[in-house]
């Protein structure tokens, strides 16, 4: 019976079929070299992010031990119902000769780099000719980079959209980094996925309720507090105030809940979900009448005192324009028009739309807001499952393929070129990644083992890991800087 948690025995963090691959490669194979790429799909560019977490969490240090070998050996005997499919000698060699450190070299593009698909993002190769099979053993784990890459890419694509509408309707782009808030912790499949996806979103934004993402960045990327949030209600804290179920009691309860929020949190930003019964009535009669003076007074106290109203149901393109009209009627005196000729609610009043937000709906909603004549700066958006969960490995078709081998001392290009799917063809030989300053383009050069194909260029693949040691780390700020969006010459 397994004494170890699945994450604890790195030897078994692989696919069953890989366990027997050491017996399949040509005899006298001494070197296997593989690469990771996004073959493209939903997005033309990808944000490279998340490898450092995998390396530090799973592959650094003395990760192979006799105990783990014994456990894996016994596991395989039972799993395949056969003896000796497990490469006991190979793993023991790693313990004896490398003190349990993996004889691998991993070279990668800087984390946070925004790079067109079909470019090499990282390479993996064995550093000990005795164990070439080790290179592809870890494809399974390393390929899981597809998730942080795809979430960071999806999150950044939404930042581009928001930035465009802010450029058109707002005076400044300063608030863009808070305008997409991560609501996704509950909508993913595990705490680890929340941590990885939550971290990937924070490459592009600073607003999150997914604490696991902040913790991952703190532990693996050295930034103590990479994401922020504010006091906010949920339906339970609003509806618990209703004394009975008659309609007046519901309205009365919501009124007392809203008033209680203003009194309990007199300063700073607070968000109040306002659709428990009737979002329009709540905006008109509670925020716009009963508590209007308290809202204004609270706002007058300090510029940072903001009430954020949260609708949470209905079609946003119908609900938001109506809310804007209601709030404009009630707070007209303090509304302004910005330099782009769009209306802005008083500084102490904003709206967060945290329902139905995805990359597909965002543009439509922003376009609808623009049509109302209100600035997008009046809004923050929240996204949950659509941000962290509505992705898969084929969203951008991430792949890990072997491209080069040395067999009996001879270099060999290794590649696939399926007649049945040319899009699945893979690159050949040793690779390097160039950014050409003239053409402003990334180029992946292939077959660099051949002197006639070799290019003299600054290779953007840096050795980040070798023989169990992390050789190059990126700070989260560097990663955020690399991934910034350029709008009007501003990097945001
Ligand atoms: O309203 C808000 O204002 C800004 C702070 C966060 C927030 C709500 N959070 C949330 C989290 C998970 C599911 C739903 C909402």
Image: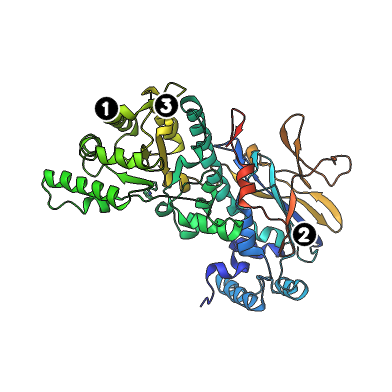
User: Number of numbered discs present?
Assistant: 3
- Report the coloring of the rendering: rainbow
Q: Which residue is mark 3?
A: 367
Q: Is the C terminus in the top left, top right, bottom left or bottom right quadrant?
A: top right
Coordinates of residue 323 in the picture (x, y in percent): 29, 32
Task: Give the label on residue 117, or none.
Answer: none
Coordinates of residue 238 in the picture (x, y in percent): 25, 50
Coordinates of residue 186 in the picture (x, y in percent): 40, 54
Give the mark nearest the N terminus, 3 or 2.
Answer: 2
Task: Give the label on residue 329, or none.
Answer: 1
Is residue 145 in view from this perspective?
A: yes
Residue pictured at 79% horizontal, 58% vertical: 31
- Most extreme residue toward the front, as rendered? 301
Q: Which residue is mark 2?
A: 26
Q: Is residue 34 left or right of residue 388?
A: right
CA distance separating discs 2 and 1: 77 Å
Which of 201 and 121 lies nearest the eye of the viewer? 201
- Within the image, what quadrant is residue 425 found in? top right
Mark 2 or mark 1, whichever is nearer to me: 1
Q: Does any atom of ligand 1 lie closer than 8 Å to the CB of label 2?
A: no
Relative to 376, is 237 above or below? Answer: below
Residue pictured at 22% horizontal, 51% vertical: 239
Query: Is the Cβ of the residue at disc 2 closer than 8 Å to that at disc 1?
Result: no
CA distance separating discs 3 and 1: 22 Å
């Amino acid at each position: 019976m397994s004494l170890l948690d699945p994450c604890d025995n790195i030897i078994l963090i692989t696919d069953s079929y890989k366990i027997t691959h050491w017996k399949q490669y040509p005899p006298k194979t001494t070197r296997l070299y593989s690469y990771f790429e996004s073959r493209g799909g939903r997005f033309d560019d990808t944000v490279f992010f998340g490898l450092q977490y995998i390396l530090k969490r799973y592959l650094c240090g003395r990760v192979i031990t006799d105990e783990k070998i014994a456990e894996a050996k016994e596991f395989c005997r039972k799993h395949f119902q056969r003896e000796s499919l497990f490469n006991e000698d190979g793993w023991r060699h790693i313990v004896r000769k490398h003190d349990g450190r993996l004889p691998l070299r991993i070279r990668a593009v800087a984390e946070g780099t925004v790079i067109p698909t079909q470019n090499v993002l990282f390479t993996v190769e064995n550093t000990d000719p005795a164990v070439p099979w080790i290179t592809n053993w870890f494809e399974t784990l390393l390929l899981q980079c597809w998730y942080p890459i795809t979430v960071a890419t999806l999150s950044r694509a939404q930042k581009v959209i928001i930035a465009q509408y802010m450029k058109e309707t707002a005076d400044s782009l300063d608030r863009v980094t808070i305008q997409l808030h991560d609501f996704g912790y509950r909508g993913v499949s595990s705490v680890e996925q929340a941590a990885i996806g939550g971290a990937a979103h924070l490459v592009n934004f600073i607003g999150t309720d997914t604490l696991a993402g902040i913790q991952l960045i703190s532990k693996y990327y050295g930034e103590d507090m990479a994401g922020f949030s504010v006091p906010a209600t949920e339906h339970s804290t609003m509806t618990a105030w209703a004394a009975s179920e008659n309609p007046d009691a519901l309205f009365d309860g919501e009124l007392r809940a809203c008033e209680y929020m203003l009194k309990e949190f007199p300063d700073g930003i607070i968000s109040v979900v306002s659709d428990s019964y009737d979002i329009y009535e709540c905006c008109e009669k509670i925020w716009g009448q009963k508590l209007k003076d308290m809202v204004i007074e609270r706002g007058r106290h300090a510029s940072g005192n903001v009430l954020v109203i949260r609708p949470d149901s209905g079609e946003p393109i119908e609900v938001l324009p109506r809310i804007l009209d209601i709030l404009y009627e009630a707070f007209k005196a303090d509304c302004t028009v910005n330099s782009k000729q769009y209306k802005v609610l008083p500084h102490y009043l904003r709206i967060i739309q945290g329902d139905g937000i995805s990359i597909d709906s965002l543009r439509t909603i922003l376009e609808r807001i623009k049509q109302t004549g209100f600035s997008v700066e009046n809004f923050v958006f929240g996204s949950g499952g659509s941000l962290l969960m509505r992705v898969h490995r084929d969203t951008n078709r991430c792949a890990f393929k072997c491209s080069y081998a040395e067999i009996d001392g001879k270099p060999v290009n290794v590649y696939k070129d399926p007649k049945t799917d040319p899009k699945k063809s893979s690159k050949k030989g040793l690779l390097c990644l160039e950014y050409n300053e003239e053409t402003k383009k990334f180029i992946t050069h292939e077959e660099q083992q051949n002197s006639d194909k070799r290019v003299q260029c600054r290779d953007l693949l840096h050795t980040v890991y070798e023989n169990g040691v992390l050789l190059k780390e990126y700070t989260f700020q560097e990663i955020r800087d690399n991934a910034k969006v350029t709008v009007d010459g501003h990097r945001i």
